[in-house]
Amino acid sequence: MVQTQKLFVYVFYACFLLSNLPTYSWGRRLFEKEGPNYAVKTIKTEYGDIYDCIDFYKQPAFNHALLKNHTFHPSTRSNSKPKMAGKNTNSLTKNDMFLDMIRFKGESCPSGTVPIRRVNKYDPDSRFPEHNVSGTVFALGQTKNDPSKKYYGANGVLSAWNPQVKPNQYTSAEIILRGGTDSIIAGWTVNPAKYGDTQTRFFIYANANNKLCFDSECGFVVTRPDTPLNFILSPLSNITGPIYTYPVFVYQDAKDGNYYLQVSSRNIELGFWPQNIFAGMKNGASYAGCGGEVYSQDTVKPIDAPVMGAGTYPDIYPDKKNFAFCKFSVVDDSHNVVVPTDIEKFTNNPEYNAVVTNQDHGKVIYYGGPFPVNV
Ligand SMILES: *[C@@H]1O[C@H](CO)[C@@H](O)[C@H](O)[C@H]1NC(C)=O
Ligand SMILES: *[C@@H]1O[C@H](CO)[C@@H](O)[C@H](O)[C@H]1NC(C)=O
Ligand SMILES: *[C@@H]1O[C@H](CO)[C@@H](O)[C@H](O)[C@H]1NC(C)=O
């Protein structure tokens, strides 16, 4: 009897040990999701995004091999901004009210630290195949190919929408700078595979010397403690309601050569891409564009063609209110912000279209799709 009791105790103890094994590994996974232990503070947004406040010098950008000996510091700012040629007055853009939306609403990371969005290490880490592979569709206005021209920046006032896409698709509105194989993209996107939801978020993407990166994952140095990258845009435009716009500006500083990123009409500088991570864009870009991009592994209509912009196809609808648009300007080789004269439309799929117009003291590019099924 005593023997049986002893055996029972041993078996019970063994079961206890075994049952704890999965708990230990589960516990470790939970810990990994808790973010780096050097986070100084954690900010959770109303949308459930978690940002860790990380010492400026420990941010992901500085893992980049070419930034090992950098001399940047928390107060590194652009010191030679391009000049706006004339006042940027227009009727399409009234957006100052969004300033508080993109910030942490009064909260901030402590000075000397920057907010880095916590990503679950099991999340997919890359966008779908980079540009110009089958399945990537553009409908935009772009500069004409002219080897004598240089662009030191692109400025797009983007109307913001919430096009719905499937888990294996994304849809974006963006400005693009390109030189050689390098490019910088900035704008808004709905990208469930990347961000795990269908919100309209601000995003940046760069191809620098064949290193392809989203957001702060490599190379982009965050400097603002109170404004997160990937902020969720709100309010958004809809077909019947008002149109809301968000300005995005990327330019190369004439003095230090870094590419600075600025959002909102209040010129909020979020950070910069250091000049030395680039190969083909060390001294300006040779191409600038603005408009829509969608990706799908399948574009069978109407089931799988992703919605671009407002989902309306320019040229069919007489009322321009129904379109997504980009009010576009570029930085010329005198480092002035100017209305580009040589903009052509580009689209690589007939389901999507762009129309370039002269309007509102500038170039306005309307774009969208897919082509409606019953027309
Ligand atoms: C950083 O500095 C070290 C020592 O001076 C040098 O060997 C290395 O090449 C430098 N790295 C970069 C990326 O400049
Ligand atoms: C895509 O690649 C083709 C050739 O492969 C080229 O003609 C075209 O200009 C490229 N389009 C873009 C948007 O880069
Ligand atoms: C469009 O936006 C307006 C104002 O924000 C809202 O009242 C309306 O319900 C929206 N319509 C649709 C179709 O979402």
Image: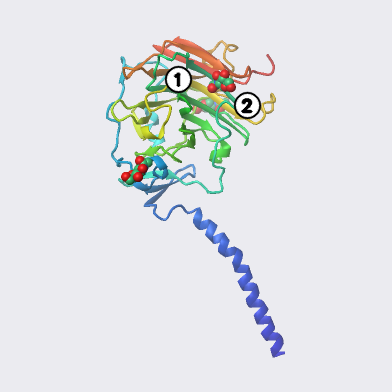
Q: Quadrant of residue 354?
A: top right
Badge count: 2
Residue at 61% in and 72% down:
17
Q: Is 91 positioned to the left or the right of 20 in the image?
A: left
The one of 314 and 317 positioned closer to us in this rendering: 314
Report the amino acid beneath label 2.
Ser
Q: Is residue 333 left or right of residue 19?
A: left
Is residue 138 visible in this depiction of the protein? no
Cβ atoms at labels 1 and 2 below 8 Å apart: no
Among all residues in the image, which is located at the extreme bottom? 2
Q: In the picture shown, does residue 163 fall above or below 18? A: above
Specify whether residue 359 is in view. yes
Name the residue: 55% across, 25% down. Answer: 293
In this figure, which residue is indicated by the disc labeled 2?
134
Task: Measuring from the top left, give residue 199's x and y in whole percent.
Answer: 53, 35
- Name the element at disc 2: loop
In this rendering, the answer to whether 2 lies above or below 71 is below
Q: Which residue is mark 1?
A: 287
Quadrant containing the N terminus is bottom right
Give ligand 2's quarter of the image: top right
10 Å crowding of disc 2: few (<14), some (14-19), many (20+): few
Residue 115: x %, y % from top left: 39, 44
Name the residue at 32% across, 20% down.
Answer: 335
Position of residue 224 relative to residue 96, above or below, is below
